[in-house]
Amino acid sequence: MDVALISDSHIPSREHEIPPSFRERIEVADHVIHAGDFDSKGALAEMRHMATALTAVSGNIDPEIGLPARATVELGGVAFVVTHGTGSKRGWADRVARAVREEADSSAVGVAGHTHELTDTVYDDVRLLNPGSVTGASPADRPTMMTATVGDEELDVTQHEL
């Protein structure tokens, strides 16, 4: 199963669209995970139109778009706990790892955004993925995202940047 991991679209307040090459990756993915900060109901509607299947959460600028603060999805035998990671940059890894433990066990993978920094790390025995900003919205300096191949409880992640 091919999964697109994205976050921090910020459409329309900071950016106008997702870059075409990233749109293509999103459209061909079997499942899309979006870690929040769509910025508008229109951006969420567009993502729902692009994605074959979507797991999404609200970000700190998404109070009115009707998404949960956390979501858990199992894909190819891998559990993903998705949250935005809202708060100071300093405690981001701790907050996301704690969310994973509250929703699943430490074998689950945490997916969060908020910092706009492309990250694939292990913190306190929990793998954390931050796909950055799919549009390159400030404070990011370029658009980034991740794709993952999942199956048989295995996860292979690739980082993409423009």
Image: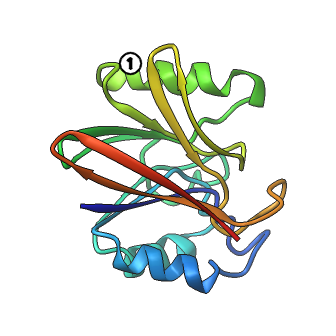
Residue located farthest toward the bottom when viewing the structure as drawn: 20
Above or below, comparing residue 59 to residue 146 in the picture: above
Identify the image quadrant of the N terminus: bottom left
Above or below, comparing residue 71 to residue 159 in the picture: above
Identify the image quadrant of the C terminus: bottom right
Residue at horizontal 61%, vertical 45%?
113
Write down the quadrant of residue 114 in the picture: top right
82 left or right of 151?
Answer: right
149 left or right of 140?
Answer: left
Write down the quadrant of residue 66 in the picture: bottom left
Q: Residues within 10 Å of mark 1 (few under 14, many from 20)?
A: some
Given residues 156 and 60, the one toward you in this image is 156
Above or below, comparing residue 159 to residue 42 in the picture: above
Q: How is the image coloured?
A: rainbow
Residue located farthest toward the top when viewing the structure as drawn: 124
Q: Position of residue 139 (x, y in %)?
A: 84, 53
Q: Position of residue 140 (x, y in %)?
A: 80, 56
Residue at horizontal 37%, vertical 19%?
102
59 left or right of 142?
Answer: left
70 left or right of 63?
Answer: left
Above or below, comparing residue 17 to residue 121 in the picture: below
Q: Position of residue 65 (x, y in %)?
A: 51, 60
Residue linked to disc 1: 101
Residue at horizontal 33%, vertical 30%?
108
Q: Mark 1 belongs to which amino acid? A: Arg
Q: Number of marks in the image?
A: 1
State the SS at label 1: helix
Residue at horizontal 36%, vertical 74%?
51
